[in-house]
Amino acid sequence: MKQLILASLLIAIAGCGTVSKSERGELNQAAATFEYGEEPTPAAIEAAIRERMVTYLKDPASAQYQLGKPTKGWMKGNPLAGGKVAYGWQVKALINSKNSYGGYTGFQEYLFLIHAGKVIDAARGFDGHWLPL
């Protein structure tokens, strides 16, 4: 069931549209006025990511996290879902957890967008739809 949910999430994210150069410029200008709040601490980032991933991992207690440094970022959502732009702190993370056989799967790259201490969007791997400022 968790794999089905994760697959659905990945399909939805894969449908994200690309952004033209002029649109990217407009979004970067808007991003300069957006209130990001304080940069989250490493502990707050890990807590938010753990909270988000608990429903997707077979054995969340076994998960090992390697977190990158947060940077201000934004992403444009799927045009079919309104194409809303979300701003927040972008964090790359490598996550390794156990599968249903009890063995570790190896570190997988994820990208999280965090705003006000909560993960507001996530993608597995970097596919170019997330655009740092």
Image (spheres, grey):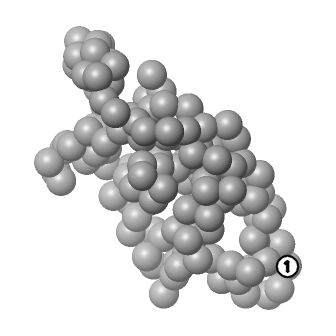
Q: Quadrant of residue 88?
A: top left
Outermost residue toward the right in this view: 103
Relative to the observer, which residue lies in front, 20 or 93?
Answer: 93
Please state the total of marks drawn on the protein image: 1
Question: For this view, does 78 lie left or right of residue 108?
Answer: left
Q: What's under tag 1, amino acid-wise?
A: Gly
Task: Name the one closer to the observer, 93 or 123.
Answer: 93
Q: Secondary structure at mark 1?
A: loop
Residue at (34% x, 19% y) in the render: 32
- Identify the residue at image location x=20%, y=43%: 83
Q: Residue at x 48, y 31 (%)?
A: 72
Position of residue 95 relative to residue 84, above or below, is below
Residue 116, horizontal then vertical, whole percent: 42, 52
Q: Residue at x 57, y 45 (%)?
A: 40
The answer to whether residue 19 is above or below residue 107 is above
Relative to residue 125, is residue 77 drawn left or right? left
Give how far across and how far down residue 27 sits, in percent.
Answer: 27, 22
Is 118 located above or below residue 51 in the figure? Answer: above
Mark 1: few/some/many CA within 10 Å (<14, 14-19, 20+): few
Q: Going by the image, does 10 lie left or right of 98?
A: left
Which image quarter is the C terminus in? top left
Say whether residue 79 is visible: yes
Q: Which residue is mark 1?
A: 103
Q: Position of residue 120 (x, y in %)?
A: 39, 55
The answer to whether residue 20 shows anywhere in this view is no
Location of residue 38 in the rendering, given as x and y in whole percent from the top left corner = 50, 39
